[in-house]
Amino acid sequence: MGESRTWLFEPEFNRTVKVCTTDDRITSDAGLLLLREADHRLGLTEHLAQQMLDPRRQDRIRYELVELLRERLYALALGYATQDDADRLAHDPAMKLAVWNRTGQQPLTERLASQPTQSRLLDTLTHHNSNRAVLRDALAECCIRHLRASGGDQAARRITLDVDSFPIVVHGQQPGAAYNGHHQEVVYHPLVASYSVAGGYDSMQEGHRLGNGFVHAILRQGQVHTAQGVLRFMTKTLQLAKPLGYVCDVRIDAGYLCGEVTDWLTERNTRFMGRIKSNAVLDARAAPYLTRPVGRPPKEGYEQIIELEPYQAASWKYPQRLVLVVVDRPDPKTGQLNLLPNYFFLIVGWKKEEMTAEAALDHYRQRGTFEDRLGEFNQAIGAHLSHADFHENETVLRLALLAFNLVSALRIEYEDEAGSCF
């Protein structure tokens, strides 16, 4: 004999929704329904499932490939980074409603796939080359669908690609993981690329198009140099990003700004910008500009932007525009200036008449938001790369970044509607 149900209340906006205290109706992850709505409008997981090979016998399966993909992606988007979470989320009503293709109340009487089924999904995504290729391109596909949905199916006028690496700490004997002397941890050292419209991740507040997100990612061994494989990576990134914008420029960090990269970008007429490591020649050029004016310094300190003569290292084919930035700020605790001012150099791939030195510095500093997004990814979603197969760990990384892209799409829409940063 069943227990009687007592409704707590009925929302006015929809009288068909009943709120009660029955266990199978309680969830702390109601945002899954928004995630599914965004995914449905973009048609992302449906597209991925249609492009992938499913080796299972279709007359003996319970869960469609698209449902398994949704279950994994949505769990990652909510911060459930391990496969063991699948057994608990399999009974969550919001997760069931978001994942199932079936309508009505039937999903509430079913359960979702278990952890072993999710493990078999990972095998399917990893060990079929065609599926790995689809998942590799899925990051850019998500960005393209969101950008075009927000702009009348048109590419943006100008986009900027940010390329960088970051460490993912691992615990165990995962293949390819190694001690990295710079980070002083046993890590993987992946390369990632992200795009933003007009170079700003908050560009919608300035009247630009909506859209940003990760476009490409590869997993690398932990001990590799920062720039290892970067040309091959950038070649693929530019190819994937081509539908996003009519004009594309690149921002890179000092670890990638070598002659091989600058010459490669120059020969392809791709505008780029990056911070270059200091050396004796550059320090000598900066020396005349490091003196302080006579008198009491202003409370906020000094900042100078100086256009220097073009710079060409011995291994470079082409000279590059060089900008010196002198930042002389007081210590936040003592209020006193440091003994010597801080300074750094920017290599700028634009001509002076195309972009002033001040505008170049502003454009480069917007890269900081990209680095913030890497921190958000590590903190909110992360990628627990604990598998005994290198390629499976790369698959998990790309799934986690794809989940982050879906969440970012919701955030961008919310920020545009609210008119403020979230």
Image (cartoon, rainbow, N blue to C red):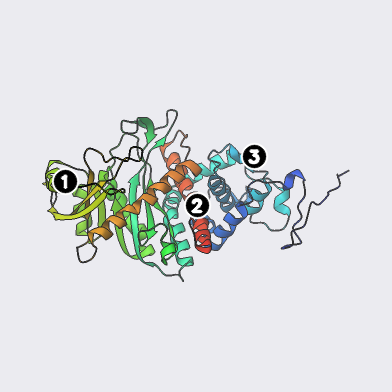
Q: Which residue is drawn at 31% across and 30% down?
A: 181
Q: Position of residue 169 (x, y in %)?
A: 42, 34
* Number of marks present in the image shown: 3
Quick one: label 2 or label 3, which is nearer the N terminus?
2
Residue position for label 3: 88
Q: Is mark 2 on a helix, strand or loop?
A: loop
Q: Is residue 295 above or below residue 104?
A: above
Please state the horizontal and vertical placement of residue 50, each as a whole percent of the image.
52, 57
Quadrant of the rendered structure where residue 179 is?
Answer: top left
Q: Residue type at mark 1?
A: Thr
SS at mark 1?
Answer: loop
Q: Which of marks 1 and 3 is in front?
A: 1
- Name the image quarter holding residue 306: bottom left
Residue 127 appears in the picture as rendered = no
Residue type, label 2 = Leu
- Judging by the rendered image, the residue that carries numbered circle 2 is 53
Mark found first going from the N terminus, 1 or 2: 2
Q: In this view, does 296 lie above or below 421?
A: above
Residues at discs 1 and 2 in contact (Cβ within 8 Å)? no
According to the picture, the residue beneath numbered tag 1 turns out to be 291
Residue 222: give x, y in percent of width and height.
Answer: 35, 35
> Mark 1 touching mark 3, by CB under 8 A?
no
Residue drawn at (50%, 52%) of the image? 53
Q: How far apart are marks 1 and 3 (CA)?
A: 63 Å
